[in-house]
Amino acid sequence: MTLKDSFGLAYKTVSSNKLRSGITIAIIAFGIMALIGIITAIEAMNKGLKESFSTMGANSFSIAYKERFRFNNNNSDVEKVKKGKRQKKSNLDKYITVNEAERFKSNYKFPAKVGLQLSGGGGYEVHFEKKKTNPNVSMRGGDENYLSINGFTIIAGRNFSNIDINTGRNVCILGSDVAEKLFGEKQTQGIDKIIRVGNTPYRIIGILKKKGSSALMRADNVIITTYNNVRRLPNASSTFSIGVAADDVALLPAAVTEADANFRAIRKLHPTEDNNYVIEKSDKIAETFIGLLGSIQGSAAAIGLITLIGAAIGLMNIMLVSVNERTKEVGLIKALGGKRADIRRQFLFESTIISIMGAICGIILGVAVGNLFALFLETGFLVPWLWVGIGIAICSVVGLLAGLWPALKASKLDPIVALRYE
């Protein structure tokens, strides 16, 4: 019996037992779907995270009064106080004031851009004539360098002037989502129009190019004004942050060192005191989140593996039942000159065909489910090719192992006894 004959018989047997084969294929498919689906979703989230934090480039960093994201209760500062450090508890998480931020900008002479930033909160509803946005628009305050440091590009209008910044007058630059909601496709016609943010009128001086949504940020659903204007808002943050973009990425380490020394002097910290602020790069934050997602990826692999183990046991039982049902057929093949190797090959082909079909169905479903997250996060269509290959390899091994015992059992049947089997 040739390999082609063995494969043909195996495929015919699988296709003739649709219910039994379908149930087994479904079990395997769900295991692979769980694995590929979660991996695809995690890759979409990883890509979204990188896009979220890429608003600051590789040559940029920020100074803030504390980490933007804390994943546990970090009591290290309190412990330092208990151990007799000179740092006072009142200095922990000390807000960055407008005077400190402006002094840093004027004193920092390194070849770099410095931008001051102040959050105005979220949940704003923006009105223009009879049109309005959903009450989910964010308000941000900055200076003339805020847009370039944070990766925004103006497609119409102008940036903030010194007069805008110093007076804090009611001028703003619209994110593309807000502009599209208020002015439709003719966004640029919004220049010099008056809108209301809540009950406060603002004159539009610029429209931003679309950046796209990401895992953590809706970068286009914003209104940007000057930080002196945001300071008057009731929802304004109590602390400033400072963005710094070095002129050359090679200068970044020196830029960070210079900024640290400069800001320590502004905060009047003793040489033995620890910093009561943080200097962080956006890519480091993204790496932290991605590291956390790695544990989810491990859990996904465990879920898929457990499901596949269950599928392998089920496939083995089905193949054993198939051996018992086809005992007479096996005897006939042997009586016609079929060898043990031919019998083993046929049953191994059957179990492998079922496993591979389950893998293919699971991969298609997993990629589809995972890309629902990619669609939501607008990160583009993703296929985790490495895990697709791993999934097919795992299912091939599962098929071979699950069919091995039944194949050996079938090959050892006595042809005379098998032919008499009812």
Image (spheres, grey):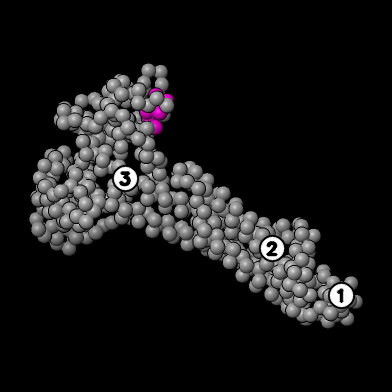
Dominant SS of magenta comes to: helix
Question: Is residue 335 inside the magenta stretch?
Answer: no
- Please name the residue shown 11% across and 42% down the image: 106
Q: Nearer the viewer, residue 64 or 375?
A: 375
Give the residue number, with chain letter if any, for mark 3.
Answer: 55
Say whether marks 3 and 2 touch (CB < 8 Å).
no
The image quadrant where one finds the N terminus is bottom right
- Number of the label disc, if any, that sits on residue 304: none
| Vertical placement of residue 30 versus 190, above or below | below
User: Which comes before the other along the chain, label 3 or label 2?
Assistant: 3
Mark 2: amino acid: Ile
Relative placement, left or right, of 238 versus 323 is left
Say whether marks 1 and 2 touch (CB < 8 Å).
no
Give the residue number, with chain letter if any, for mark 1.
Answer: 332
Q: Give how far apart the Cα atoms at labels 1 and 2 are.
A: 24 Å
Relative placement, left or right, of 298 versus 253 is right
What residue range appears in magenta? 177-184
Q: Position of residue 96 (x, y in %)?
A: 18, 43
Mark 1: amino acid: Leu
Can residue 269 be seen by looking at this rendering? yes
- Please name the residue shown 21% across and 52% down the image: 248
- Please name the residue shown 61% across and 70% down the image: 397
Q: SS class of the residue under badge 3? A: loop
User: Which comes before the other along the chain, label 1 or label 2?
Assistant: 1
Q: SS class of the residue under badge 1? A: helix
- Please name the residue shown 25% across and 43% down the image: 149
Give the residue number, with chain letter if any, for mark 2.
Answer: 354
